[in-house]
């Protein structure tokens, strides 16, 4: 059973009761992420997420950790390019203390200047971790290349120089500008009673007040093509090939997911069969969609021996061109639709995943989409719909190739069909 309540301050509460579960997950989603940072603020959204756990006016960081462990639960947060999320998952009997803890972290975190200085080193280590992971680092390079100067192309973790010089007052000013109840969603999924939940939520978040109107300034990205090589002495060449994608609420979104599944989104996909199974050129090869509120990308990732990298690029672009020209057959279409329906149903078997879906639905569409509605939308995807979308998204003019490793830019450029 689903219900939506808007508090007097404008904060939206979206909740789904799942009495068959013994858990409940509560997520507080603020509609601000790395794309909303201006020059000099790169990494602020992510850094604020870290600071929520460093202590409040009534709890130290150690007390926060001990309290969630005593509840047998999970307390965490994450930052994306468009949102900042703080969430807690506990047994259903611990709903009230979980909400109290979440509220304390959100409303009363101290942001102690000494903790800010210490956390700078933690975040800088996180940046180094990404740079030492070829797959993560490549995808960061690729996003920056594909989306060029658009704010969506920035790394979520921020820039080293910006992190080093940020101060407590900068973070508080950023929150004052962007954190507003009208741009916040509380999503709750699991075993609870609505008559108990709503008063608890009002007590925990009803006093949340923003300053003026929420500040959200966004514009659609443009995908930029080209070839970029970042040479590094690695055992493998890591490759990303990017194309146009779609916004998260696009009318053809399920056709786009079918297209991705056929291209490289599963072990029965064309790229997996052609490059790994048939030729043994790569262990890891897959494609995925990145969807944002006003745009998106379709990306293929592969890792191969450096001398085989041009061949992998050649075969990948050939499959992209073939899919755009000829579309897919009925068996591929049905297999992709069955795969998608299975993935959707399996992914919603936990209170955490249900909470995530509730929030994303509200932020992107302003309404709840039931499982039955989603399955019906997938079933309605047609050959013509996928073919039309293929013609738009798989346009070689938007192809961006990014490589990390001991490969030459000239060789990759010549390999593009």
Image: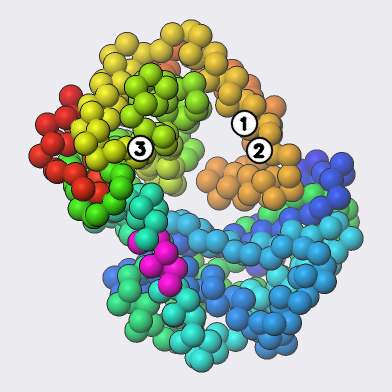
- Write down the region rendered in magenta: 125-131
Dot 1: what SS?
A: helix
Dot 2: what SS?
A: helix
Residue 343 bears which disc, if any? 1
Residue 347 bears which disc, if any? 2
- Marks 1 and 2, how far apart at CA: 6 Å
- Is 207 above or below relative to 24? below
10 Å crowding of disc 1: few (<14), some (14-19), many (20+): few
Q: Nearer the viewer, residue 121 or 320?
A: 121
- Marks 3 and 1, how far apart at CA: 23 Å
Residue found at the very far front of the displayed protein: 235
Q: Position of residue 102 (x, y in %)?
A: 70, 70
Horizontal side of residue 223 vs 356, given as left or right = left
Q: Are marks 1 and 2 in contact (CB under 8 Å)?
A: yes
- Is 367 above or below relative to 98? above
10 Å crowding of disc 2: few (<14), some (14-19), many (20+): few
Q: Quadrant of residue 103?
A: bottom right
Which of marks 3 and 2 precedes in the sequence?
3
Membership of 130 in magenta stretch: yes
Q: Position of residue 187 (x, y in %)?
A: 68, 54
Membership of 290 in magenta stretch: no
For the question of whether residue 319 can be seen, the reply is: yes
């Amino acid at each position: 059973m689903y219900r939506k309540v808007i508090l007097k301050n404008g904060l939206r509460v979206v909740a789904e009761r799942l009495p068959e579960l013994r858990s409940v997950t509560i997520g507080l989603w603020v509609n601000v992420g790395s794309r909303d940072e201006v020059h000099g603020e790169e990494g602020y959204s992510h850094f604020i997420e870290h600071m929520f756990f460093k202590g409040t006016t009534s709890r130290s960081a150690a007390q926060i950790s001990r309290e969630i462990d005593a509840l047998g639960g999970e307390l965490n947060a994450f930052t994306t390019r468009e949102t900042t999320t703080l969430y807690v998952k506990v047994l259903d009997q611990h709903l009230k203390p979980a909400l109290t803890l979440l509220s304390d972290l959100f409303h009363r975190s101290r942001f102690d200047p000494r903790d800010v200085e210490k956390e700078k080193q933690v975040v800088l280590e996180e940046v180094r971790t990404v740079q030492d992971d070829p797959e993560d680092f490549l995808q960061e390079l690729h996003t920056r290349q594909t989306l060029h100067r658009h704010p969506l192309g920035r790394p979520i973790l921020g820039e080293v120089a910006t992190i080093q010089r940020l101060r407590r007052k900068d973070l508080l000013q950023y929150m004052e500008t962007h954190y507003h109840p009208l741009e916040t969603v509380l999503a709750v999924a699991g075993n609870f009673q609505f008559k108990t939940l709503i008063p608890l939520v009002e007590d925990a978040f009803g006093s949340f007040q923003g300053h003026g109107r929420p500040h959200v300034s966004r514009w659609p990205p443009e995908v930029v093509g080209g070839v970029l090589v970042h040479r590094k002495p690695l055992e493998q060449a890591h490759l990303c090939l990017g194309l146009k994608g779609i916004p998260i609420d696009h009318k053809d979104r399920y056709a786009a997911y079918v297209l991705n599944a056929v291209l490289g989104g599963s072990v029965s996909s064309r790229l997996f069969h052609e490059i790994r199974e048939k030729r043994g050129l790569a262990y890891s090869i897959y494609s995925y969609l990145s969807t944002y509120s006003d745009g998106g990308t379709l990306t293929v990732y592969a890792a191969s021996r450096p001398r085989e990298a041009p061949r992998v690029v050649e075969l990948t672009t050939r499959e992209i061109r073939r899919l755009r020209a000829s579309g897919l057959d009925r068996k591929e279409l049905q297999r992709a639709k069955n795969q998608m329906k299975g993935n959707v149903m399996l992914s919603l078997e936990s209170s955490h995943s249900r909470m995530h879906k509730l929030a994303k639905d509200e932020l992107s569409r302003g309404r709840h989409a039931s499982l039955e509605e989603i399955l019906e939308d997938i079933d309605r995807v047609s050959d013509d719909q996928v073919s039309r979308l293929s013609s738009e998204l798989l346009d070689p003019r938007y192809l961006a190739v990014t490589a990390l490793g001991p490969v030459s830019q000239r060789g990759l450029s010549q390999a593009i069909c």
